[in-house]
Amino acid sequence: MFVDIAMLVESQGGMIDRIESNMDQSVGFVERAVADTKKAAKFQQEARRKLVIIIVIVVILVIIVALAIGLSVGLNKR
């Protein structure tokens, strides 16, 4: 009977070791995911800032072109 119990404990010990190994691996994956999420949030913020700058530049260029066209048409009418 004790031999049977010893065999069961030994066979389940390997399973427990694999479970523990998988848990350790999962912790590493979660830590990496947290770091990657922080990086992604930073990149998203930088991309949003760049988009705003590009939109402002495009609006300024449109205003300059509109003024140039408006002034040239206005000068030609005189």
Image (cartoon, grey):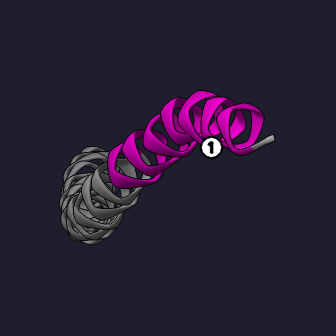
Tell me which segment is drawn in magenta: 2-25
State left or right for residue 26 relative to residue 68: right
The C terminus is located in which quarter? Answer: bottom left
Dominant SS of magenta comes to helix
Frontmost residue, 57 versus 16: 16
Residue at horizontal 24 percent and vertical 48 percent from the top: 65
- The residue at 64%/37% (across/down) is 12
16 left or right, relative to 68: right
Q: Secondary structure at mark 1?
A: helix
Determine which quarter of the picture holds residue 39.
bottom left
Is residue 8 magenta-colored? yes
Residue 29 location (% of width, % of height): 36, 48
> Who is closer to the viewer here, 2 or 57?
2
Amino acid marked by disc 1? Val
Image spot of residue 51 (x, y percent): 30, 58
Residue 50 in the image: state x and y as whole percent.
Answer: 19, 60
Asked whether the viewer can see residue 74, the reply is: no
